[in-house]
Image: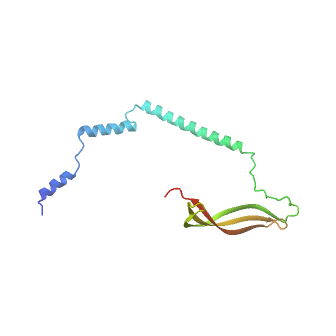
Amino acid sequence: MPKPEEVEKILARLVPAAWSEEGAAGLSGTIARLAGQDQKPAQVAKISALRTLRKRIATGGIAALFAIGGFAFWNHEVPRNKPVVSHHSATAEMVLLNTSERIETMSDEGWREAEDGSAMQAVRLRVMDVDNVLDGKTGIVMRISQPREELMLTPITSF
């Protein structure tokens, strides 16, 4: 087992040296300068007033932009979903309001070869078509969903 004096010498090497008088004074001066404490009170008040003025001008400008934007859209009508009506609307009982499709699942099918012999990446998609239809007689809106599968081929440009 090592002697206590040897352990203390090893530990003394691990402890960082204290700051010198010069280094501590220089560090505190740098911190004070960065914090603005070495400036005169009149300079600090002037800088503070300028910062406040800048903040007020920026806030006023933003408020003016919002006011202009609000006035621009004040009388603006929001477009509504208008029914897509065929030319036989007088006799049509069902009116298509809108249609959408969403991808429900997507799976990798690996590489396939195209007709010209190039490599293609195959991806199988399960797509859901959704149509909203209005019944002209009753006023009921129905949602019609139809699933379908697609195989999408993408050319492979790098290996």
Q: Residue shown at 60%/38% (left/top)?
A: 61
Q: Residue shown at 37%/36% (left/top)?
A: 33
- The image shows residue 57, relative to residue 134, as above or below, that is above
Identify the residue at the far right of this view: 90
- Quarter of the image containing the N terminus? bottom left
| Colouring method of the image | rainbow
Q: Residue shown at 74%/64% (left/top)?
A: 132
Quadrant for residue 86, please give it.
bottom right
Quadrant for residue 39, please give it.
top left
Taking the image as shown, residue 57 lies to the left or right of residue 91, namely left
Q: Residue shown at 75%/49% (left/top)?
A: 77
Count the numbered circles shown. Answer: 0
Q: Position of residue 158 (x, y in %)?
A: 50, 56
Quadrant for residue 68, please give it.
top right
Taking the image as shown, residue 156 lies to the left or right of residue 25, namely right
Taking the image as shown, residue 66 lies to the left or right of residue 140, namely left
Q: Nearer the viewer, residue 41 or 116?
A: 116
Q: Position of residue 14 (x, y in %)?
A: 21, 52
Identify the residue at the far front of this view: 116
Q: Nearer the viewer, residue 54 or 156?
A: 156
Q: Position of residue 146 (x, y in %)?
A: 70, 69
Q: Position of residue 23 (x, y in %)?
A: 26, 39
- The image shows residue 64, relative to residue 6, as above or below, that is above
